[in-house]
Structure formats: C-alpha cells, structure tokens
Image (spheres, grey):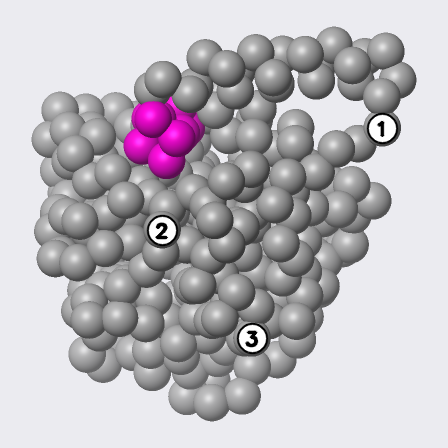
C-alpha cells in the first residue's frame, strides 16, 4: 500500500504527513496519528497505518512542527502543547477532505503521543475514538523511572539554571536523545540506545539524536492525564506494557481505573516498551487498535 505525501498547516507552519486511503470511494472514517518522544512518522507508524487502512480507515501519520519533514524554525524543540495543537490541526485537515467522514475521526498515540491523545480526546469533541498506547501519564514520573529520584533534584536545578540563562540571552542548548553509556541523554533506559540508533535511525533519515534542553523542562511539567475524567463518553482503548521501563504501566492503569469512565478497554501486554513497535507484542497491539477503531468508528467496516 502506497502512501501519499501531503502537507497541512498548523498555526501557520507546514507539517508533513503520509496519507493512507483504503479501498473504495469513501467517505471514510479516519485516524490521525503521530509518534512519541523525538520520533518521526516513518518509524514503525506505516506498519500501524497500513493495518488500519486494510480495515477500511483512512489514516494520516504526520511529523510535528520542528521535526522530520515538517517545517519549523526551532528545530528539535519538543513542546507538548504545540504538538497537541498539531494533532488538532491534523484532525481539521482530515475533516476538510471530501473523502473523509468528519463525524468519524479517531486518534492514535504511543508513548509521549499516547499522552497527547488523552488530552486531545478530552478536549476536542470531534474525536470519536482514542487509542493510547504505553502512554506518558505524567512527565516527572517518567523522569524518575529513567533517572532515579536521587538524580531528579540535581537535574531540576540544572533546568532552572538554564531557564535563567535563556532569559539572559544564552544560546539554545541541546541534549542527546540517547547515548551509548546511557548518560547525559534524555532516554537512559538500557534498551533505548540500540533501538533508536539501530532501528529508528535506519528507518528515518530525518530522525536526529538531539532535542533542545528546554524540551526536557516541558516534558517534566507535562501531565496529560490531568483531564482524563473528561474523556468519557469518547471510547478509549489503553494499551500498556507490563515490563515497560520508559513509560511505567502502573500510573497508566491507575488513571484508567480511577479517572476514566466507560466505554473503555485496558489491554495489558507482556514485555517492554519497544516490543509494541516491532517485537513480540506488536501484532497484538496493532490488531487491538484496528479492532477498536472499526468498532467505534464504523461497525460496517471489514474486520
């Protein structure tokens, strides 16, 4: 299945996307999807998108502003509020197309964007189904998991010092996404370096192993589950990985049980974070998401 390269505007900036159309003439239900922490649309998103298209859904996978093939002057700057706006503008683009049924649009997100779609689904009533995979629930919890609580205070002070320096005219600083020894980088988990450099980087030449240091401040402050109680009655599928060392499963399960009302479904998969992209649990995660969208965006679609 061949994707069409498209662009849409988000707050005046051109964003790049891959558009997948199912067979037939439409109007189709649709799914909007983007990647997680620092990643771009070519990294395993096409595998999910093709499965959704085979099930009868049009799919738009896109790059956020400042990343990948999208425009943006503040390159490699990761601001969740900005990325959420990009999601919402991607929804607007899809809803404006005559081959899309604007009343049947869902959102899919994973890891960092798994948090984004919780927020989008809570606030944007155009969204009719949500799949949140291994979601970021609260940034500070992810940082503690990655770095250890004993290092958080030191790192927080470093970010505070850098904020003051920015105000006083200091240049933009960057941090590596991953490093071979797991030090002085954003993703310190022992599996991260090999996955990002041996898989993600080979799949997408536009992926860069750096982020603005300010991105880490934005990440630590981020709490996408704060509005989770507003998601209902939009159907939510949450997929977690029990051995996840990147976005811990327990906070996500707690939010699912305590703040989110029906209709909802929780899928607990074995293995770790990266297995949902190309490992042992990929097929199950892919199928669960496709089935959820088919069920809630159009029961007449083929399974």
Query: How far across and how far down the image is residue 206, in percent?
Result: 67, 66
* Placement of 140 over or under 154, stated as above or below: below
Q: Quadrant of residue 283?
A: bottom left
- Frontmost residue, 44 versus 290: 44
Q: Which residue is mark 2?
A: 190
Q: Secondary structure at mark 2?
A: loop
* Placement of 280 over or under 54, stated as above or below: above
Question: Which residue: 43% across, 19% down?
Answer: 152
Magenta-colored stretch includes residue 79: no
Q: How many marks?
A: 3
| First along the sequence among labels 2 and 1 | 1
Q: Quadrant of residue 223?
A: top left
- Frontmost residue, 146 versus 86: 146
Query: How far across and how far down the image is residue 24, in percent?
Result: 42, 88
Q: Nearer the viewer, mark 2 or mark 1?
A: 2
Residue 171 numbered tag:
1
Asked if the residue at tag 3 contacts the one at tag 1, i.e. Cβ–Cβ closer than 8 Å, the answer is no
Q: Quadrant of residue 2?
A: bottom right
In three-dimensional space, the C-alpha distance between marks 1 and 3, rounded to whole angstroms, equals 30 Å
Q: Which residue is mark 3?
A: 202
Q: Which residues are magenta?
A: 139-148
In three-dimensional space, the C-alpha distance between marks 2 and 1, rounded to whole angstroms, equals 31 Å
- Frontmost residue, 264 versus 204: 204
Query: How far across and how far down the image is residue 17, in percent?
Result: 62, 66
| First along the sequence among labels 1 and 3 | 1
Question: Which residue: 32% across, 72% down?
Answer: 278
Q: Secondary structure at mark 3?
A: helix
Asked if residue 180 lies left or right of residue 212, the reply is left
Magenta-colored stretch includes residue 144: yes
Mark 1 crowd level (few <14, some 14–19, many ≥20, 10 Å Cα): few
Asked if the residue at tag 1 contacts the one at tag 2, i.e. Cβ–Cβ closer than 8 Å, the answer is no
Residue 38 numbered tag:
none
């Amino acid at each position: 299945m061949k994707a069409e390269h498209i662009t849409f505007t988000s707050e005046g900036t051109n964003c790049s996307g891959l558009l997948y159309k199912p067979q037939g003439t439409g109007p189709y239900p649709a799914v909007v999807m983007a990647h997680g922490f620092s990643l771009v649309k070519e990294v395993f998103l096409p595998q999910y998108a093709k499965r959704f298209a085979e099930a009868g859904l049009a799919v738009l996978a896109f790059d956020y502003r400042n990343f990948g093939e999208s425009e943006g002057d503040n390159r490699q700057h990761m601001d969740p509020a900005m990325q959420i706006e990009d999601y919402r503008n991607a929804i607007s683009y899809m809803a404006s197309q005559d081959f899309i049924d604007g009343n049947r649009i869902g959102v899919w997100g994973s890891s960092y964007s798994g948090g984004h779609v919780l927020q989008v689904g809570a606030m944007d009533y155009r969204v009719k189904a949500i799949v949140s995979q291994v979601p970021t629930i609260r940034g500070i919890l992810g940082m503690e998991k990655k770095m250890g609580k004993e290092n958080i205070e030191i790192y927080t002070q470093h970010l505070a010092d850098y904020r003051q320096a920015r105000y006083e005219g200091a240049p933009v600083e960057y941090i590596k996404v991953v490093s071979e020894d797991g030090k002085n980088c954003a993703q310190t988990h022992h599996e991260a370096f090999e996955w990002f450099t041996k898989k993600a980087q080979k799949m997408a030449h536009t992926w860069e192993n750096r982020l603005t240091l300010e991105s880490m401040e934005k990440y630590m402050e981020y709490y996408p589950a704060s509005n989770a109680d507003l998601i209902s009655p939009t159907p939510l599928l949450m997929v977690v990985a029990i051995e996840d060392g990147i976005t811990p499963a327990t906070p996500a399960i707690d939010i699912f049980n305590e703040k989110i009302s029906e209709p909802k479904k929780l899928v607990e998969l074995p293995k770790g974070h990266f297995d949902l992209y190309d490992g042992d649990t990929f097929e199950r995660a892919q199928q669960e998401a496709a089935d959820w969208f088919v069920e809630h965006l159009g029961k007449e679609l083929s399974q």
